[in-house]
Amino acid sequence: MAENDLVKRLMWSATLAGVGLVLTVVTERIAAFIWRRVFDEDPPD
């Protein structure tokens, strides 16, 4: 199954999307933490 180029490309795209999602969530949480520490309020939506 993994020998097929189309399957490999789809798996690569899914991996990139998953890593991107995780990094986005982590980045947003870090930024919100910093915002709360600096301004002592929730970040704007």
Image: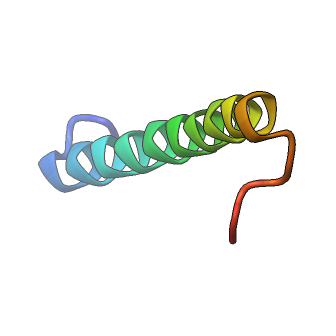
Residue at the (79%, 28%) spot, across then down: 37
Where residue 33 appears, x then y in whole percent?
A: 75, 32
Residue at the (52%, 35%) spot, across then down: 23
Q: Quadrant of the C terminus?
A: bottom right
Where residue 24 appears, x then y in whole percent?
A: 53, 44
| Name of the residue lying farthest toward the front | 39
Q: Nearer the viewer, residue 42 or 12?
A: 42
Q: Quadrant of the N terminus?
A: top left
Residue at the (66%, 30%) spot, across then down: 30
Classify residue 38 as left or right of residue 14.
Answer: right
| Name of the residue lying farthest toward the left | 5
Classify residue 33 as left or right of residue 16.
Answer: right
Q: Nearer the viewer, residue 41 or 29?
A: 41
Classify residue 3 as left or right of residue 19.
Answer: left
Residue 2 occupies which quadrant of the picture? Answer: top left
Q: How many marks?
A: 0
Where residue 22 appears, x then y in whole percent?
A: 59, 38
Where residue 38 appears, x then y in whole percent?
A: 71, 31
The colour style of the image is rainbow
As drawn, 29 above or below 13: above
Q: Nearer the viewer, residue 14 or 2?
A: 14
Residue 6 occupies which quadrant of the picture? Answer: bottom left
